[in-house]
Image (cartoon, helix red, strand yellow):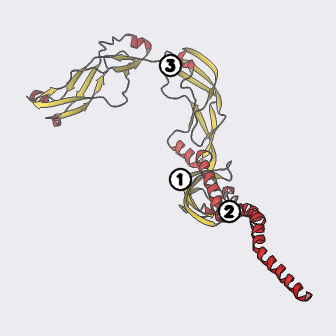
Amino acid sequence: MDSQWNMQDAKARWKSRIAAAPSSFRRRFTRETLIADLKTLLIVAPLTILIWVYAEEQQLVTEPNVALSFDVQSAEPAQRQVALVNPSDGTLHVTLQGSQSGIEHVKASLRQTFLSQALEIQIPGDTTTGLQQLLPLDQISRNPIFYSQGVTVIACTPETITVRVDALEDRTARIVAPPNLPGLLKATFDPATVTLRGPSHALAALSQFGQLTAIADLAGNPVLKQPGDHDKLAVHLLPQPNITFSPDTVSADLLVGQADQTLAVTPVPVKIEAPKWLMDNYKFTYKEWLTDPVTLIGPRRAIAQINPANARLTAVVDLDNTDADFHGLKPVTFQTQNLPDGVSVQPDPSPRTIQIGVDPR
């Protein structure tokens, strides 16, 4: 009997435990497991996103038609000079391959080359002189702008560039004053000659046309406004493209006279010059006076003799028999024989013309 009751008690206890299990499980899941899972999720989810973003950025992509600015330099600048001929604007378009982030860094660097210093392509010192076509891809690919970001340059357009390679030579040139400096009567330089160093083809061209000279930088020098002798002036030489001077500064002795002056005169009478047949059979319609000022230039004393309102200057329009029935613009020249010695008409920026009509009488 006791055994039967003990068995019934045991069954009752197990039923009670089984019935209470779901409630206990739910309490542990909602209070402990859920909190732990959320903590793990807060850590794992950002890491998962970062890993996914990194993988996307590192995926190999290809981007064509990326512009870069470049310049050419000689590997032996003391012996040879290199000039870019084509493409004349110094721009190439390249195709890049690498990660998206690496390509974006490269493009940012290339944008800076347009604003500051262009990408340098070095021309080997043993390159033959004259016009040469070269393949720039290898040199561009080796530039740290690309390989430091793990980016490869797989193509460029154009595929070749054209450069002119010249040996640098020395020539002796005499020093001269700039032409037509008002008031400069004489200029003597010490030393009288300097050494020009530059590309052989440029020096040969200057020599061929009689321009192998070094021009003293005198224009705008204030001493030109002071008549008299001016000795031992330090004078620089005017720069010439791709050419250096040795020395680049010389001593100059100058003799300065009175500088030319200008005078605007108006009005100026207009005269028609034409063959007798045209004069007898046709009449001319035109303004008989130029009302726009005409500028005269000459020595101060000669300019002082001129009356601006009556300068004894005449504007001339030349016609011939083919101008019968002409209506339009004709160029104007000037007769200056009545002006004082040394005075002339200063050329206008554009040729002066007047409107004229030629009609039968």
* Disc 1 from disc 2: Cα separation: 51 Å
* Disc 3 from disc 1: Cα separation: 43 Å
- Residue to which mark 2 is pinned: 49
- Image quarter where the N terminus lies is bottom right
Work out whether residue 240 or residue 228 is closer to the camera in this orientation and state it: 240
Using residue 265 as the reference point, say whether residue 255 is left or right of it: right
- Residue to which mark 3 is pinned: 183
Q: Quadrant of residue 196?
A: top right
* Disc 2 from disc 3: Cα separation: 81 Å
Residue lying at 60% horizontally and 56% vertically, measured from the top left: 129
Q: Which residue type does callout 3 highlight?
A: Gly
**Helix, strand or loop status at disc 1:** strand
Dots 3, 1 in contact, CB < 8 A: no
Q: For mark 2, does the 10 Å Cα neighbourhood hold few (<14), some (14 to 19), or many (20 or more) residues?
A: few
- Image quarter where the C terminus lies is top left
Dots 1, 2 in contact, CB < 8 A: no
Q: Which residue type does callout 1 highlight?
A: Val
Circle number at residue 85? 1
Using residue 201 as the reference point, say whether residue 299 is left or right of it: left
Q: Position of residue 149 (x, y in %)?
A: 68, 59
Work out whether residue 308 or residue 61 is closer to the camera in this orientation and state it: 61
Q: Position of residue 303 (x, y in %)?
A: 39, 13
- Which of marks 2 and 1 precedes in the sequence? 2
Dots 2, 3 in contact, CB < 8 A: no
- Which of marks 3 and 2 precedes in the sequence? 2
Q: Position of residue 161 (x, y in %)?
A: 55, 58
Q: Is residue 239 visible?
A: yes
**Helix, strand or loop status at disc 2:** helix
- Which of marks 1 and 3 precedes in the sequence? 1
Residue lying at 16% horizontally and 30% vertically, measured from the top left: 357
**Helix, strand or loop status at disc 3:** loop
